[in-house]
């Protein structure tokens, strides 16, 4: 999973385009949550995933960062169900971006990691 993300980093710009195209196809109502120019947003999301993937071995540092991120998402009007939509868009993007590197174990690893990140964010969003 760490290795496959490193493969995506050089194509992060394209991957981000694919990701938002898929996300707004899955749920057009989510477009309204983002600023009209999402260029900065694309960079932030890719940077955040890169940081998360690289620091998976250092969960103690990662968890508080992800909790704070989850709390900020409440202010962005993100709902719990939206995490599923974002997860689906992310998997679709990785599948397209990675081609034959997208194997069942790689897919399982991404599902597990996204699941952990999103549940930490969702849990944190429920507490003050
Ligand atoms: C693991 C899941 C996610 C990660 C790693 C992530 C990451 C980020 C980051 C790094 C930012 C930049 C601002 C900040 O740091 O507070 C951000 C903003 C934002 N995210 Fe997420 N996000 C995730 C899930 C979601 C979901 C499920 C949605 C729902 C559509 C969403 C919508 C937004 C919106 C609307 C903004 C603010 C855009 C703006 O006003 O500039 N995110 N996200």
Image (spheres, rainbow, N blue to C red):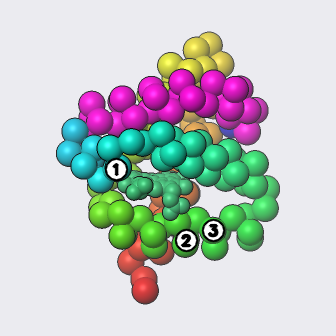
Q: Does the residue tagged 1 have its C-beta within 8 Å of any atom of ligand 1?
A: yes
**Callout 2 touching callout 3 (CB < 8 Å):** yes
Residue 64, horizontal then vertical, whole percent: 63, 73
**Residue 10 visible at all:** yes
Q: Quadrant of the N terminus?
A: top right
The alpha-carbon separation of the residues under discs 1 and 3 comes to 21 Å
Q: Quadrant of residue 67?
A: bottom right
Along the line of sight, the residue nearer the viewer: 9 or 126 = 9
Q: Secondary structure at mark 3?
A: helix
Q: Residue at x 61, y 31 (%)?
A: 12
Question: Which residue matches tag 2?
Answer: 67
Q: CA distance from mark 2 to mark 3?
A: 5 Å
Looking at the image, is 121 positioned above or below residue 117?
below
Q: Please name the residue that numbered disc 1 is placed on.
A: 34
Identify the residue at image location x=55%, y=72%: 68
Of 107 and 55, nearer the camera is 55
Q: From the viewer's perspective, is the residue at label 1 or at label 3 nearer?
A: 1
In the rendered structure, does residue 61 fall within the stretch colored magenta? no
Asked whether residue 91 is in view, the answer is no
Horizontal and vertical percent position of residue 26 = 27, 35
- Quick one: label 1, few (<14), some, or many (20+) residues within 10 Å? few
Outermost residue, left side: 29
Q: State the residue position of label 3.
A: 65
What span is colored magenta in the figure? 2-27
Q: Looking at the image, tell me whether mark 2 or mark 1 is earlier in sequence order.
A: 1
């Amino acid at each position: 999973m760490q290795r496959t993300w490193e493969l995506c980093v050089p194509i992060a710009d394209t991957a981000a385009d694919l990701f938002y195209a898929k996300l707004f196809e899955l749920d057009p109502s989510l477009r309204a949550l983002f600023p009209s120019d999402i260029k900065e947003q694309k960079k932030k999301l890719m940077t955040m995933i890169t940081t998360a993937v690289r620091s998976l071995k250092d969960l103690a540092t990662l968890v508080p960062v992800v909790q704070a991120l989850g709390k900020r998402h409440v202010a962005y009007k993100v709902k719990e169900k939206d995490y599923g939509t974002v997860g689906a868009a992310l998997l679709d993007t990785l599948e397209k971006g990675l081609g034959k590197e997208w194997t069942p174990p790689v897919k399982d690893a991404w599902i597990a990691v996204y699941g952990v990140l999103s549940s930490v964010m969702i849990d944190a969003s429920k507490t003050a």
